[in-house]
Image (cartoon, coloured by chain):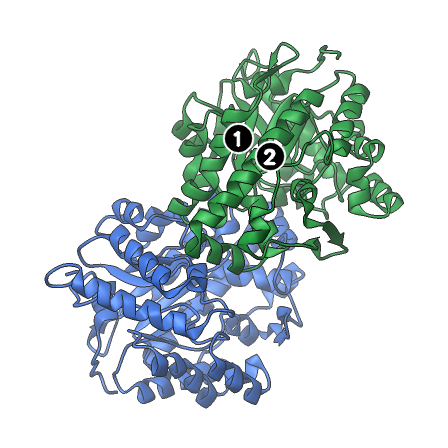
Chain colours: A green, B blue
């Protein structure tokens, strides 16, 4: 595999090494706010068809890089492909979000779960990773990702999105050992899956703990954080003679940044409800930080977006270890020109801020 | 007015005075989880008819007190009655939440807003307060409430519930002075409205900042906290020869408890994502704390509910200043028997914990 990488800002920043300008990529940078994405989605017929066809997933992954000088590509896929590969039967109904045909409803359902072989049941993802790496040709690194065990379990038990999390919370409070059994098998599946992505060419691995923030502190540590740490311990940390950095992100997890940093990951994602300067003080030199502009700031006028980007850069301060991102995904209603404004602002402002950049 | 109060645990705990057992009430204790509420709601024809008819609002307010030995009643109403009284035209469509017929769409819309006279435009609420006080006959104190200016402004600008808060965030980032103008008039309206409730007989005032948690820290302080402080400064603090305690609650505001405590309020509500012991250490002796059981714990079996209640009591620890509550409202799918279990557990466990109760 071609290990030449023309833009290694992301990898350097994730390892807290000096960079010329602050690298930026955006969660959901390939997504509905882009008209070319909506066209590709319509052509594919369904969201799953888009994910499951490597050529289409590759096309959509690269779309934002054509428009914006982003410092990373992120695999186009969905965190729920893993439970789908475990036999739950995933579909996306228009406007209603994900649905599992066979949600987990009993201890027997959980006992039946097996860890999928990513080169078999999730081969379409690994093929997409290989294809994207080839098409990227070393322009920027490729980020692979998976959902956290807690977050995946939430969907697997609820059967889809939930407002009140009645089923998973009842399981958590009433049958914690059964929930641990579920989380263990999902953590193994996620670890093997991410290692498969890394073997296929993913140069960074990110774990999205979208629903960790709905937990009370003790429950978070027991049912989400512990499995994030287990995944970190099980991941391949070097490939193509390079360190493969790991990013952990618990949305709404601002209170637990120290715990996340202590897992052994390389970087922690931070949502916009946390002051990035305070976050940095709290985690110290242990990890890099990724974030944390309010995604809704992209609805503002260009000059305001520049001001807000400058504020995030100032909050982080001088020195290495910052990857600019939103605090959550790009929202579907955002004008792509606003994203262009943001990417340009981050590169320009971080490069001119100090002699020698933010190194 | 009859100032005799047979159960003053809530008022004592809010003022950090000793109590025999920890007082408990629940956000949305009068609500859809109760079959008698659903009957009353169906009889009224609409949610607004329930709010706007003092006899019906009184009936619904008292329903949970018939079932459970709660230590407070909370006025049955909605935070959006204030914007409705300001001319926005509130309605609730089945299953879709609140809708304003005339949301704020321009600077002119905001300039036109006037502060309603609560004895005129919100007379139905104050009549309900007077009626509830009469019917309560001093059994427990009555809590009055309002929404925070930021939370109300969110609905007024979006026109209803929102997923991405595009309009209010664009206003915040692009036209902060226009948003301040809106927040100022709403803060005045809320202050006068709560003072009206206190004059009518509310013995505690609580401000619900449901959406403060969607703000970045600087934005929270500027657009939500500042107006909470303005309201606290403007409220009547004594009535019927008693202190009228003020409770502030920002959902998702765990990072800002010190700021809330510094407003001059008497108590701060805490959601379940915060460790109550740590919260207490942070705010010290300045305020009482209200919370913070995960509302989804009420889906668990009775013995688990008792354990979780015991954990919250242990987290808070000995000494005065704790009002037991959920971290958010009772969810509609909860079995009322589970609420009975919780109320009994809190009284029993807090009373037996230490010789002399938690005083």
For the point 28% across and 73% down, which residue is it? B71
Same-chain check, marks 2 and 1: yes
Task: Please indicate whether residue A104 sits to the left or right of residue B304 in the image.
Answer: right
Q: Quadrant of the N terminus of chain A?
A: top right
The image's mark for residue A43 is none
Q: Are marks 2 and 1 in contact (CB under 8 Å)?
A: yes
In the rendered view, tell whether residue B163 sits above or below residue A26.
below
**x, y (%) of residue B108?**
65, 63
- How many residues crowd around disc 1 within 10 Å: few (fewer than 14), some, or many (20 or more)? many
Name the residue nearer the viewer: B159 or A215. Answer: A215
The image's mark for residue A231 is 1
Q: Which residue is mark 2?
A: A190
In the rendered view, tell whether residue B152 sits above or below residue A234.
below
Q: Chain of mark 2?
A: A
Local SS, label 1: helix
**x, y (%) of residue A77?**
72, 37
């Amino acid at each position: 595999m071609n290990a030449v990488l023309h833009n290694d800002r992301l990898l350097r920043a994730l390892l807290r090494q000096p960079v010329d300008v602050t690298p930026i990529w955006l969660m959901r940078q390939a997504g509905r706010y882009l008209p070319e994405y909506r066209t590709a989605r319509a052509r594919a017929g369904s969201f799953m068809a888009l994910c499951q066809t490597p050529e289409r997933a590759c096309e959509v992954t690269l779309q934002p890089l054509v428009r914006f000088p982003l410092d990373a590509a992120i695999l186009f896929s969905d965190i729920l492909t893993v439970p789908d590969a475990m036999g739950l039967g995933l579909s996306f109904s228009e406007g209603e979000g994900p649905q599992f045909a066979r949600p987990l409803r009993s201890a027997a359902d959980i006992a039946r779960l097996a860890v999928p072989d990513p080169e078999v049941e999730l081969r379409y993802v690994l093929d997409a990773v290989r294809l994207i790496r080839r098409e990227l040709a070393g322009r920027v690194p490729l980020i692979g990702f998976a959902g956290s065990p807690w977050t995946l379990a939430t969907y697997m038990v609820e059967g889809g999105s939930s407002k009140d999390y009645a089923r998973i919370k009842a399981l958590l409070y009433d049958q914690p050992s059964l929930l641990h059994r579920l989380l263990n098998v999902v953590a193994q599946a996620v670890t093997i899956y991410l290692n498969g992505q890394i073997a296929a060419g993913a140069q960074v691995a990110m774990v999205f703990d979208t629903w960790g923030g709905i937990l009370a502190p003790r429950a978070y540590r027991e049912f989400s954080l512990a499995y994030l740490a287990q995944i970190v311990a099980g991941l391949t940390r070097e490939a193509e003679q390079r360190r493969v950095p790991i990013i952990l992100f618990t949305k709404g997890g601002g209170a637990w940044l120290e715990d996340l940093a202590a897992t052994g990951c390389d970087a922690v994602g931070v949502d916009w409800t946390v002051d990035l300067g305070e976050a940095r003080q709290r985690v110290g030199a242990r990890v890099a930080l990724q974030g944390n502009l309010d995604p809704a700031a992209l609805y503002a006028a260009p000059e305001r977006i520049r001001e807000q980007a400058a504020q995030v850069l100032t909050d982080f301060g001088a020195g290495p270890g910052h990857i600019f991102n939103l605090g959550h995904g790009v929202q579907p209603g955002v004008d792509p020109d606003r994203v262009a404004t943001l990417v340009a602002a981050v590169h320009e402002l971080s490069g001119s801020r100090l002699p020698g950049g933010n190194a």
